[in-house]
Structure formats: structure tokens, C-alpha cells
Image (tube, helix red, strand yellow):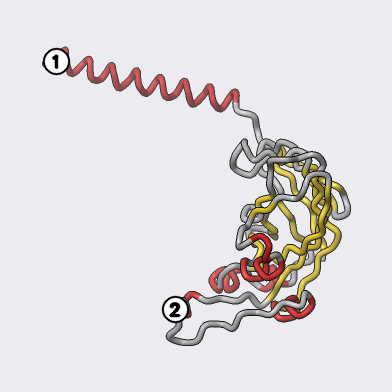
Amino acid sequence: MMKKKHWVILSVVLLVLAWASRFVYLNLTTERQQIQTYAMGETVEYGDDFFYRSDEKRRGYKIVVHSAEKMSYEEFAEKQNLTLPPPPSPGDEGYEYFFRADIVYDVRVTIINEGNTQGNIDMFDTLLSSGKIRMRVDETLWDLLYPQLAGSYSFKARENTQMDFHFPFVLESKLAYDHCGSAFLKSKSFQLSISQYPIKKIIEVKL
């Protein structure tokens, strides 16, 4: 019985040592994230850097951020000649979850595709941030701006073409709005993240 107990303890120790060796190996060999920062007006290459998957294949894509402007949700819709859907009424499905942001951060960009036939730009992970507050492109405004995308948060540009876009970033919920604080709403400086690894590429956005 004692011999069996010793074998169990030895097996556990060997498993722990094997796990620890693998952990140390991965930490020593894994490429560390680097951060590169760019200014508005610069042409920034996506290259082989990605958000979460190494198969995103965005080599050949480039982005230029031209300008950024803060305005009300309704003002943005009016400037872009968009007809907003009416908000749900009490008793309608989804009424209790409905939220429409007060402020839109409109970032105007050009997307350039030089020779890419496979990759796409992922707007779900393309975030605008200030401090710990992060914003995504508003789903409703995005669908109204680009109905040809059929509700997708990703898009492809034709090979060897370029296209101008408006990225309407918003706080996505009342909870986020209530917790962001007045300092955030008054902020004039933001960061647009276009990749995470192995190089995190950030474009400084000034209102």
C-alpha cells in the first residue's frame, strides 16, 4: 500500500515538473508583443500582424486616418443622410435592452488594398480607446452606411483599389456611458488599434 502511494506521489511530481518545464519553455520562446504608434495622416500597413488569429492574411492592406470629429448621434445621421430606425416602444421586443448613444466619434479613413486577394478588415476588433474606455463601431450606423455588407462587421476591398470610410465609434451601452466619466467625454485624444500581435499597431487620433 505504501509503495503504491509513493508511485502516486512520484507521478504527480513528474506531471508538475513536466508542466513547469513546458511553461518555462513557452515563456522563453514566445515572441513578445511590441507596440508601434503612428500619427494621423500616416499610411500604416497591416502587414502580418493580427488581432487574435494568425490566419487573418491582411498583408497588402493599409489604412490612413484623415480626421476625427465628435457629434451627436442624430447629427451624424443627418450629415450622412441616414434615416434612423425608430426606437422600440414599451412592450416591444428588445425594449428593455435598447440603447442609443448620445455621442458618435466619427473617424474618417481610407483603406488601401495593394495585391491582397484573401484577407479582410475586421471592424469588431478595430477599437477606438481613451484610457480604459474602448469603443466599437455602432452596428446600426454601420449597416446604414454600408448596406452592401449585409450586416457584416468585416469587409474586403477589391484588389489594387482604395476606398474612403466613416468609422462611427460609440459607447455600446448605458452602463459604459454611466461609468466612462466626464473626463472621457471631454477627451480630445484617442487611440485606434488595428492589430494586437506580434506588433500592436496604434494610430493616435486627435479630435
Q: How many marks?
A: 2
Crowdedness of circle 2 by 10 Å Cα count: few (<14), some, many (20+)?
A: few
Q: In terms of image quadrants, where is residue 77?
A: bottom right
Q: Position of residue 126 (x, y in %)?
A: 67, 54
Q: Position of residue 168 (x, y in %)?
A: 71, 66
Which residue is nearer to you in this view: 5 or 31? 31
Kindly state the secondary structure of the residue where label 2 is placed: loop
Name the disc covering residue 107, or none: none
Which residue is nearer to you in this view: 73 or 13? 73
Q: At x 62% / y 37%, what residue is drawn?
A: 55
Q: Position of residue 18 (x, y in %)?
A: 41, 20
| Quadrant of the image containing the C terminus | bottom right
Kindly state the secondary structure of the residue where label 1 is placed: helix
Residue type at tag 1: Met
Q: Is residue 137 left or right of residue 116?
A: left
Compared with 144, 121 (above or below) is above
Q: In terms of image quadrants, where is residue 165?
A: bottom right
Whole-number angstrom distance, CA of label 1 to CA of label 2: 65 Å
Name the disc covering residue 2, or none: 1
Which residue is nearer to you in this view: 180 or 112? 112
User: Which residue is the site of mark 2?
Assistant: 93
Residue type at tag 2: Glu
Compared with 88, 152 (above or below) is above
Q: At x 62% / y 36%, what residue is drawn?
A: 54
